[in-house]
Image: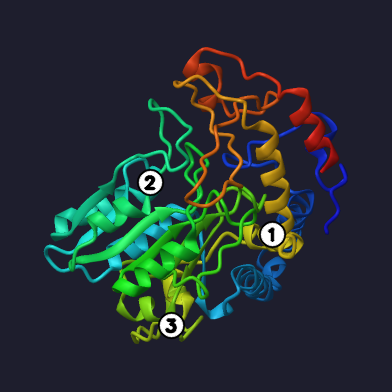
Amino acid sequence: MFDKSSARFPIKAGRIDVNHCGIAPMYAGAAEAEQDCNEARVREGVLGAAGYGPVLRSLHESAARLLETDATNISFMKNAAEGLSLIAFGYPFEHGDEVISYVHEYPSNHYPWRLQEARGAVLKLLPDVDPSGVVGEGRPRGWSLNNLEALVTPRTRVLAISHVQFTSGFAADLEAVGQFCHDRGIDLIIDAAQSLGCLPVLPERWHIAAVACSGWKWLMGAIGCGLLYTSPALRERLRIVMAGADIVTQGDDYLNHTWHPHSDGRRSSTARSPWRWPPAWTAACGTFLCPVTSHRSGTRSFASGCVSIAPRPDASCTCCVAGAEPLRHSLPRVRGCAGTCPPSHGRKRDGHRPRRLPARCAAFLQRR
């Protein structure tokens, strides 16, 4: 286990925060690493970045351990949308090829695929259903494997879904869905922004072609950093749609314009990433690598203590707990964020102040 003290998580001193699915409080170790990097640049200029290369490699290695893959399959991104867009625009669609997604997907995993309609691709959307049978209509819930099977045709090339839905907390069974796609030759593209660091995401075990995520949710890193996993088989088929100095094998030989792009995850690195973010996220990834199972256990316990908390149908705060039984249970959203809702999720949108969590939920979180 890792250090859960207020020294490492200062927000605990003043409030109980359950908004990790939006913008999580930054891990103190990540903030310190970012500050050290900024200080080095202030005092030493470019010399302060002398250790940047090893830090970036360390980030790739940490992320690879988290995903149980090789570091060569990892690309550093600014957010999930960047990674998903690179895949969508680089995918070798032919006219009439199909992409299946969910009707209530987050925009970052909707618009990149919708824009492929200009290339002749067809976007088909899974209807909203309640796999648990306990959540009424009027708000997003989830989707079903039966409906997925009904939409698949011989022209289906991609299934693009979130591991955990941002509106409902519905968690897809990636192992089952991955096997479904593998058996039919479909590339499974996962937005793991709402789950990575909380739930296991194992692309090579579960036949996932790509995983994109942002780093400021469950991984508690800096805003503006993300990761992209791509399988070697998918990378071989993707067109390169963005390019920069870091994408080619000749490194700092900038006058050599020979076209030799990397074959590994670096082929998606279009430009030098901000120096301060990889150290911050490396610190967070290194801390939270081992306890993914523990995170899942904790969120599932929290979920079981809060299933009676049902928001109004028009409530917009999505501080959900993503520990539901995959494809069988959908959790209600938790609307009591102890005053930590971002402005767009709080009073400005629905006219109500966020309420504090019930005592039993607060007590559970204080024990974590």
Contact flag, marks 3 and 1 (Cβ < 8 Å): no
Above-or-below relation of 34 to 231 = above
**Distance in Å between CA atoms under marks 2 and 1:** 25 Å
Q: Which residue is tagged 2?
A: 143
Q: Residue at x 61, y 15 (%)?
A: 353
List x then y, in percent, for residue 234. 36, 76
Q: Residue at x 60, y 61 (%)?
A: 200
Residue type beneath disc 1: Val
Type of colouring: rainbow
Image quadrant containing the N terminus: bottom right
Numbered badge on residue 262: 3
Return the x and y of residue 365 as percentages of the image width and height: 78, 37
Q: Tag 2: residue type?
A: Trp
Q: Is residue 117 left or right of residue 243?
A: left
Q: How many marks?
A: 3
Left or right of 125 on screen, residue 24: right
- Label 2, residues with CA under 10 Å away: few <14, some 14-19, many ≥20: many
Mark 3 and mark 1: Cα distance apart in space: 31 Å
Residue under the point 73% across and 47% down: 298
Identify residue for label 1.
Answer: 292
Using the image as rendered, state which of residue 218 and residue 86 is in the foreground: 218
